[in-house]
Image (cartoon, coloured by chain):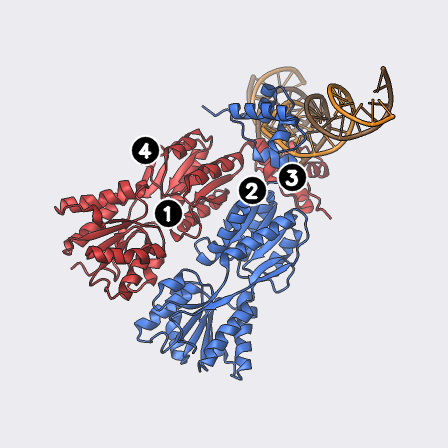
Chain colours: A red, B blue, C brown, D orange
Amino acid sequence: MEKQTVTIYDVAREAAVSMATVSRVVNGNPNVKPATRKKVLAVIERLDYRPNAVARGLASKRSTTVGVIIPDVTNIYFASLARGIDDIAMMYKYNIILTNSDDAGEQEVNVLNTLMAKQVDGVIFMGNHIDDKLRAEFKRAKAPVVLAGTVDPEGDTPSVNIDYAAAVEEAVTNLIKRGHEKIALALGPLSQSINAEYRLTGYKRALSKAKIAYDDKLVYEAGYSYDAGTKLQPVIADSGATAVFVGDDEMAAGIINASMESGIDVPNDLEVITSNDTIVTQITRPAITSITQPLYDIGAVAMRMLTKLMNDKELDEKTVTLPYGIVRRASTKDAD
Amino acid sequence: MEKQTVTIYDVAREAAVSMATVSRVVNGNPNVKPATRKKVLAVIERLDYRPNAVARGLASKRSTTVGVIIPDVTNIYFASLARGIDDIAMMYKYNIILTNSDDAGEQEVNVLNTLMAKQVDGVIFMGNHIDDKLRAEFKRAKAPVVLAGTVDPEGDTPSVNIDYAAAVEEAVTNLIKRGHEKIALALGPLSQSINAEYRLTGYKRALSKAKIAYDDKLVYEAGYSYDAGTKLQPVIADSGATAVFVGDDEMAAGIINASMESGIDVPNDLEVITSNDTIVTQITRPAITSITQPLYDIGAVAMRMLTKLMNDKELDEKTVTLPYGIVRRASTKDAD
DNA sequence: ACAGGGGTTGAAATCGCTTTCATGAAAATA
DNA sequence: TATTTTCATGAAAGCGATTTCAACCCCTGT
């Protein structure tokens, strides 16, 4: 009982016109007499004809599909970007092929290649780091690539981000103004440029402007997870730091919970600021002061840029920087 | 500078064989003399040939792509299922076209149709409710559909779930054993069968076994969100309930935080049990006692079933029920 | 030495649609 | 009315693979 598929040819026959004409009405080509258009439409309706997107893709060399590479869908930060991407994509009639990369370089080039094989018209890449190999693949790809929430220090690839360094600098400066001198920095792997070349830079800038000596003993590399935070907490406690800037919300939640449970009061004994303003920051007690990022918009803008690129239009700016903010919650003391 | 694409024909010419032969080596067909295979492989390597998946899809009528319909990627519950789906899909060399449906019926049939147009080999559907229209579309679709973490009371469509009614019954029974008589039930819309026909049923069963009268004043319909929880909390407080079973983790978090802040201690004044055991349950203070579900596995098993269906194999069981558990955390008092 | 086979290969049809190009009809111009 | 444009339409050539079928080659068995 294999279902019979009705093709453009069936429609043409039934409507007594050529396939070309059917194709025209399906694609909204204006060069069709209203009468014939109506006739064809009627047949399409009657036969319940649905154009085969694969055949269409082969003939037109456009798949109206874009690839999206994400480290892990279950990561709220990236998932939020993905939601923005999908909404805009849908608005432009594109579909999304979503693949998890686990942030692993090898996997990333793999999925990029299978995406290209599927003839995606473009790809949006999210990740924590871009190495030379990946960069080379981007160049080599025949479809445009846009980075969302992902930095490339080389600036080769169009991207949408906030100014991470400035945001961290501002957050840390706030801490300094409130009298902190030993401020810890809890990040993901320093092998990733987002950490090593942006957040760390902002941190150092804040310190140097306040004439506080930089001490790399206060910089911690951990994973982007709740457990990583709980494990890191005692180490931070030992350091004697009175405040900490954290690169990931779940990690920050781990640090806060572990602190509170070991008798270290947040914010009185330890102030905490985190980076992504995901829902996690509102759920913890105390709730977490955070840099705010327009997550959805980062995805949305990236997708908009990609549609331009896919239609061979010029980009107004290759590197888009969206505004950030800082929202004060209970994990820091009042500034005034 | 449009990049030149190398086709199977180019490879055939360079290797001095027919396209058929190239196709065979690419697809691992054994009927190729080792010497020719090697020769072809060398040319493929030299030309950096990548088969065009779209052309392949048209010719073979298989796209090695499956559609995934999800209410919202940013919902951790569904995102966790999606991760399981993608991992298994990747294992079987399938790609995922992911589309958000916002749980809206109309949108759901829309995306289902565009997925079918894209010739996906199958689809995995996630949602909170399946109405007749959707069910009809599933039947009509020429590709198999599997439900993940999604119930269809009609049981027409293959699905993977836990026994929601039993889980709720057990959770509520625990509450009753600890002496509670006024137990609130905070769910999503009762128009959704997961709530009206499963969770509510389990709740009623627990009550009736304990000979406690059912009071529909204790059943609340809200949204699946943190804010919905904070808004619902005062209402629950007014009801005089001493315990509550919640259908969504973020909602539970909202209820807990709002309770604590209004002086209602969890678990001493109000015990809380939630449903999905997402990371949220570990982040709140107190952490939330929850039904545990093998989220990743629900997705993974669904995808495995789908691969069988896509290869015209029989399913061992059409309705798979995975085991659940209950993990005790601080939002409930010790049972013993 | 010759028929029968199995293992390798290639020719060609096909998948369902887009798109160029040519053509006939209708409308505009002279 | 004759001629030029414009408009609608159809024929047919791809797009880049898979797949059927027939042909061929070389090895066995007798």
Give how far across and how far down residue B99 sits, in percent.
51, 49
Mark 1 Cα within 10 Å, few/some/many (few <14, many 20+)? many
Give how far across and how far down residue A16 sits, in percent.
71, 35
Marks 3, 2: nearer the viewer: 2
Q: Does label 2 lie on the same chain as label 1? A: no
Do tag 3 and tag 2 residues touch (Cβ < 8 Å)? Answer: no
User: Which residue position is annotated with label 3?
Assistant: B61
| Residue A199 located left or right of residue B298 | left
User: Which residue position is annotated with label 2?
Assistant: B93
For residue B166, above or below residue A4: below
User: Which residue position is annotated with label 4?
Assistant: A154
| Residue C8 located left or right of residue D16 | right
Q: Which chain letter matches label 2?
A: B
Query: Residue, x 28% and y 45% (percent of image)?
Result: A164
State the residue in front, B117 or B302. Answer: B302
Give how far across and how far down residue A36 sits, in percent.
65, 37
Which amino acid type is marked by label 4? Glu
Q: CA distance from mark 4 to mark 2?
A: 33 Å
Which amino acid type is marked by label 1? Asp
Which amino acid type is marked by label 3? Lys
Mark 3 Cα within 10 Å, few/some/many (few <14, many 20+)? some
Tag on residue A297? Answer: 1
Q: Does label 4 lie on the same chain as label 3? A: no
N-term-proximal mark, 3 vs 2: 3
Q: Secondary structure at mark 1?
A: helix
